[in-house]
Amino acid sequence: MLWLFAIVLGVVFGLVTGGRIGNLAGLRFRWPWLIIAAVVVRESVVLTPLGRVDGARYAYVLALAAIVAWTIWQFDRVRGIWLITAGAALNLLVIVVNGARMPVAPEFAVALLRRGNVGQYTVMGSGTQLNLLGDWVSLYPSPEVYSPGDVLIALGLAIVVFLAVRNPSVYKELTPP
């Protein structure tokens, strides 16, 4: 939900400052289907019963690694995408060092407290590493909890969309004729 809000915010600020929604068409990505596939795999593990299958968390890690690689590949084409890369890389780091699971602060992990692990999530504690990068950021009024990486991704999405809506020429200059 945070990322959708960030995209909408980027569009709104872009429009308010004189941009046009049609300018989003100026974004030129390399291999756009790769990112779509990675996001679909990632969200499938998070939002479907597939997340309860123990091995699915590794598919989540691979999808996140693909997102990091894909965004790095877009650096010269899309201004601001480096923030998305940084956030996704922080999430990938904390998940990898915790056995393909994202630590969640106990006060936000009601369902996890009974089982210890659910899908790619685990309760944050002395047995988890890099807890500062785990899911502990609560953004009112959302009932969800986010990691610092998620917040960076959202910031990056808002900036990329804002720049695309407001000033598509920065992207058109980078695409070959």
Image: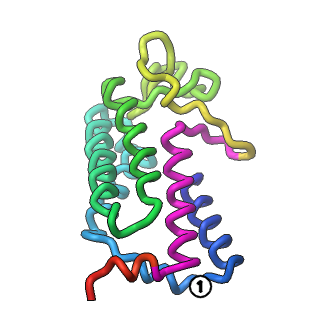
Q: Quadrant of the N terminus?
A: bottom right
Residue 58 sits above or below residue 47 on the image = above
Residue 138 in the image, given as x and y percentages of width and height: 66, 37
Span shown in magenta = 142-169
Crowd tier of the residue under label 1, counting other residues whose Cα lies within 10 Å: few below 14, some 14–19, many 20 or above: some
Decide if residue 91 is on the left or right side of residue 67: right
Amino acid type, callout 1 = Arg
Residue 5 in the image, given as x and y percentages of width and height: 62, 59
* Majority secondary structure of magenta residues: helix
**Residue located at (68% from left, 46% from top):** 142
**Residue located at (54% from left, 71% from top):** 163
Decide if residue 147 is on the left or right side of residue 141: left
Q: Nearer the viewer, residue 22 or 174?
A: 174
**Residue located at (57% from left, 27% from top):** 109
For the view shown, which residue lies furthest in the right direction?
141
Residue 70 sits above or below residue 16 on the image = above
Residue 102 in the image, given as x and y percentages of width and height: 43, 31
